[in-house]
Image (spheres, coloured by chain):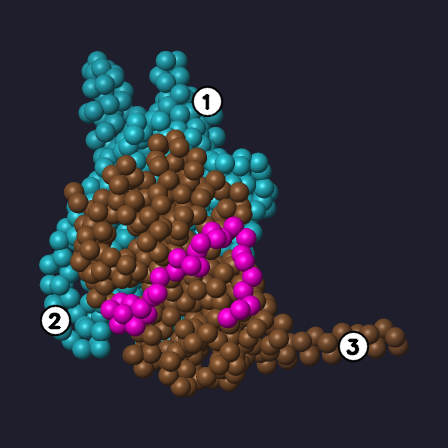
Chain colours: A brown, B cyan
Amino acid sequence: MKKIKSLFLIFAVLLFSSVSALAKTQLTVYSAIEAEDLKKYAATFNEDHPDIEINWVRDSTGIVTAKLLAEKNNPQADIVWGLAATSLMLLKSEGMLEPYSPAGVDKLDPKFRDSANPTSWTGMDAWVAAVCFNTIEGEKNGLPIPTSWKDLTNPVYKGHISMPNPSSSGTGFLDVSSWLQIFGESEGWKYMDALHENISAYTHSGSKPCKQAAAGESSIGISFAFRGAKSKADGAPIEIIVPTEGVGWDMEATAIIKGTKNLDAAKTLADWSISLKANQMYNDAYAVVAIPGIAKPVPFFPENLVSSMIDNDFDYAASNRSSILEEWQKRYDSKSEPK
Amino acid sequence: MKKSRDDYLTIFFIAIAATYILATLALPMYAILSKSIENKEGLFIGLSNYKYYFSNPSLFYSIYNSLFVSIITTIISVTLSFMFAYALTRSCMRAKPFFKTMAMIPILLPSLLAGIALIYLFGNQGVFKALLMGRSIYGPIGIIIAEVFYTFPHALLIIITALSIADARLYEAATVLRSSPIRTFFTVTIPSAKYGLMSACFVVFTLVITDFGIPKVIGGQYNVLAIDVYKQVIGQQNFEMGAVVSVVLIIPALLAFIVDRIVQKKQISILTARSVVYEPKKNKTFDLMMFLYCSLITLFILTMVGMCLYASLIKFWPYNLSFSLKNYHFDLMDGGGWDSYYNSIKMASYTAFFGTIIVFTSAYFIEKARTIKTARIMMHLLSMMPMAIPGMVLGLAYIFFFNNPNNPFNFIYGTMAILVICTITHFYTVSHLTAITALKQIDYEFESVSSSLKQPFYKMFFSVTVPISLPVIFEIGIYFFVNAMTTVSAVVFIYGPKTTLASVAVLNMDDAGDIAPAAAMGMMIFYTNAFVRISYVIITKKVLVKFQQWRTK
């Protein structure tokens, strides 16, 4: 009898679990956050909302943006969680975002949310440009440690620098847009012309230059601080350099895609994405998060990083995104293989 | 003549097979062609996309670069594999089976892994960097070395076949006429193998010009056509331009395919019933030289694979060389984690299972049926077409065809099914040819006898044809499995969030700069394929012998 009872119990549990598996809402989430964080973010969210299953579509910023634009008439994504705010501003101007003010939006730093009411997007954290310098390779190749962006155009670095391609990488784009703001349009392009002479490769992703520098495949990688800190924690012989002119940055942000069939679940995720718990999770790796005053220092981050963030004009970057990229491709992409 | 039930069944099955190929190849290809003459809104704009594309000067670099690496690779790969095949067929050196097995290793790896191996061997932190004397491995040098590695076994198999059908009488005649060995080589050996050599050239050329994995990993800033397709589609999501470059890419592949077909037809006719099989004679110096040459090539292949194995187990290349399994923690990387690996195994198994059934059944009807001859010939020609279509082009065509909301099969988009269908179609032709060759060896009398005994053909099919053909059926299944595990080109455009694949994960991890984990995932694919191959050898030795006893009698 006992056996039958326990069998029955097992059966009931199985039935229940399969029913609950069926009942889970499937949410397609487009994202550009670092791959190693995907599982952590989903699991932390599921602690509070086990009934929503996140199906990630992750790629570099430029690719996720291009994918969303290409699917404009037949959207596949329910929500975007972790994409550059400049990209989301562009999507907003295309009328692709569902305006929704998540619960607790007023707790965010005003910089970290859409100024419209209701908001179309909300920020998560800031990711900041930085230069990874491999000290062992630098010494071997007789390279001085650079301290500014301008230093990188020194012919001594020829062939030793890699940087992300701004059309595919969000990090690449924030570099380019920040140089245009720091140096001004014409000086900025002149700066990139000079830098181009020293670049060994334009990579697809924003983390690759720093990973290459960490592995000694190149000596200098123009990348972002988070990646540098991670590699340094792994034991890579790199210095994370914050150029003296100031560094570009962008926000990772969240927005609901207009036309989603899972609006309620998307709203749940949007609410959660700006909660205190979520912000503390972002703080594991990012020194600046959307809720002011809660961030703790992140290990291996350069101290002067936050104070060096430029006063970024996001409207400028977002509204000129396609013309900047077109100009960049014309100058460097087709020129990349002269034969 | 009244048609029998068998005839109707034949017509029915041929119709199904024809519909399958039309729906999975012809219609998607039509979709890609029409996409290339449309704008973003789907309106017809004539050849403006082509005009725009051809006005871009960087295109000519891509065409030039593609042709350059393809031609150089073809010359090197065919020369090396010819010498290797020559050693295997015309010398009495030791360890021939060992060398032949080693030479097949590259088939079991995703082509990208060759690029990754070169980064570790010759990159800026490479073990043998000094050998390049200051030149960079990123670029044409790297592409060509990796492509030679990748195409070597493909060329070798074709040339071995060509060299093993030598007619001993010609060599006797040459000896009698006191021809020097070198002269005999150029007047007898080369001419009798010339069709095999030409065929090998075309196969290698097509493989290289349509491959994008290797240039992606090791090409640096060196653009080739296949990379252009990838950049347009994945990087810019500009599908119309992707379609345009695809059409440009089909042209050389299609030309090579047509010439190869013509050449292959000629090859069959040089064998006559009176030919005497050539037996190599012992020659100490020559055998030793051949042995050394084969050892050298084997050493190169093993170094490439061994380097990836080693690199995948190192904690932090090149600064912390202690061993660790951290690179196998795929869940922390791009590409979908361990799920990708399991998905790949699922995908490869489905592809092997359904692919073999579809290919073998339709080959059976094409070869053995007695009715509707014209339809069967047409069907055979259709079965040859997939080989002419580069994988990336096929994958892109699948997006256009299946992601169209008006397509009744739209629901399979983003599922495992579309990956399986695409992969079966991609590798259809070679499996089809294997099946046809095997079926030709079975006497047609079987069909005549069974039909005069008034037995339905399917009874005959299941009780005679299938058991006799079991080795070849397994061979086809393994061909599908191994290729489904390693392919990147077609599936890179159509995998979905729940159907990420191991081979694509290798690509994505490399893109993100995680080269060691990419090597680790590539090695997982290798272990799996090697395991399947070795199991096959054991099974054929132990189990299939039962079905094959008649052959030895």
Secondary structure character of the magenta stretch overall: loop
Q: Circle 3 — which element?
A: helix
**Amino acid identity at mark 1:** Arg
Q: CA distance from mark 2 to mark 1?
A: 62 Å
What number is the disc on residue B46? Answer: 2
Q: Which part of the image, by quadrant, shows the N terminus of chain B?
A: bottom left
- A31 above or below B207? below
Say whether residue A30 is visible: no
**Amino acid identity at mark 3:** Leu
What number is the disc on residue A9? Answer: 3
Total marks in image = 3
Q: Circle 1 — which element?
A: loop
Closer to the camera in the image, A86 or B321: A86
Start and end of the magenta stretch?
Answer: A292-321
Q: Are marks 1 and 3 on the same chain?
A: no
Residue in the picture at 48% in, 59% down: A35
Q: Which subunit holds the residue at mark 1? A: B
Residue in the picture at 32% in, 37% down: B137
Closer to the camera in the image, B353 or B187: B353
Q: Are marks 3 and 2 on the same chain?
A: no
What number is the disc on residue B94? Answer: 1
Residue B321 appears at what percent x and percent y?
A: 54, 35
What number is the disc on residue B156? Answer: none
Say whether residue A87 is visible: yes
Q: CA distance from mark 1 to mark 3?
A: 66 Å
Residue in the picture at 49% in, 61% down: A286
Q: Which subunit holds the residue at mark 3? A: A
**Contact (Cβ within 8 Å) of mark 3 with mark 2:** no
Q: CA distance from mark 3 to mark 2?
A: 67 Å
**Contact (Cβ within 8 Å) of mark 2 with mark 1:** no
Q: Magenta includes A308?
A: yes
